[in-house]
Image: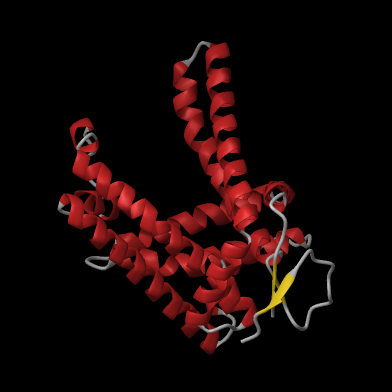
Amino acid sequence: MKLNIVPARTGATWVKLGVKVFLKQPLAMVGLFFMFMAALSIATLVPFIGGALALALLPAATLGLMAATQQADSGKFPMPTILLSAFRAGKAQARAMMVLGALYAAGFLLLMGVSALFDGGQFARLYLVGGQISEELVMRGDFQTAMWVALILYLPLSLMFWHAPALVHWHGISPVKSLFFSFMACYKNFGALTVFGLAWIGLFILVGLLVTLVATLLGSPEFAGMAMLPAAMLMVAMFFCSIYFTFRDSFTSDQAEPEQRPDSVDISA
């Protein structure tokens, strides 16, 4: 397996490909995304362990959306069972994906635990359990400190798990090695991922402005309130479609046909 080092402008290409493949199968991708969200929401309802269970399922669920994107990109209609791809590739890979999910849940809960040292756990409780948000709470210095600590710690966690589910599923890499390879791929392609992130932020802002503009032209502030959430959900679904392409272009299998790449590094296990 080789790690491909791509130019920064590739990040914009990933965004375009995500939007393009979404538009190929919009009904299927929207339906799968809402099933993805519903599955995680149902998991949170399990008494005592619901929050941790939802976190543990996130890598496998994300892999399911990536597999759906792969099928849609090849012209196929992804069926709902594609979301279970992580658990249908054999016992060994299913077990590895469960380990990966447990590691993600443990890492996320650990960073929330660190943030709790700064505000007594108010931010962590609000994020994991839910509750009422008040202006007074949000403006408190200790709450804001805890929030920023959690965000800063989440960045390396996110980089470690960005490609990890796909590496476990498509390349048979062990969970621990997949975290290392994922982090290195993100580090080597940080320019492309930065452009990727900034492009998506720009698109989200643009869609928000368009919804607001339409509401203004219609003279109906209620329209903005009604349309903003569905528009945001569609954008998030497109975002998840684009994640597959960040993986596809970052790694090349030894068995795959050689491609012209700007640079590559052999990271065979």
Which quadrant is home to the N terminus? bottom right
Q: Total marks drawn?
A: 0
Q: Is residue 167 visible?
A: yes
Which quadrant is home to the C terminus? bottom right
Q: Which colour scheme is used?
A: secondary structure
Is residue 82 placed above or below 202 in the rendered structure? below
Q: Nearer the viewer, residue 68 or 18?
A: 18
* Quadrant hosting residue 150: bottom left
Where does residue 198 sit, x and y in percent of width and height?
A: 58, 43
The residue at the far left in this view is 120
Is residue 44 placed above or below 204 in the rendered structure? below
Where does residue 196 sit, x and y in percent of width and height?
A: 62, 49
Where does residue 163 sit, x and y in percent of width and height?
A: 57, 68
Going by the image, does 46 lie left or right of 254? left
Residue located 31% across and 62% down the image: 111
Going by the image, does 259 lie left or right of 109? right
* Quadrant hosting residue 104: bottom left
Where does residue 184 sit, x and y in percent of width and height?
A: 57, 70
Going by the image, does 223 lie left or right of 17? left
Q: Is residue 241 visible?
A: no
Q: Nearer the viewer, residue 237 or 7?
A: 7
Residue located 19% across and 37% down the image: 140
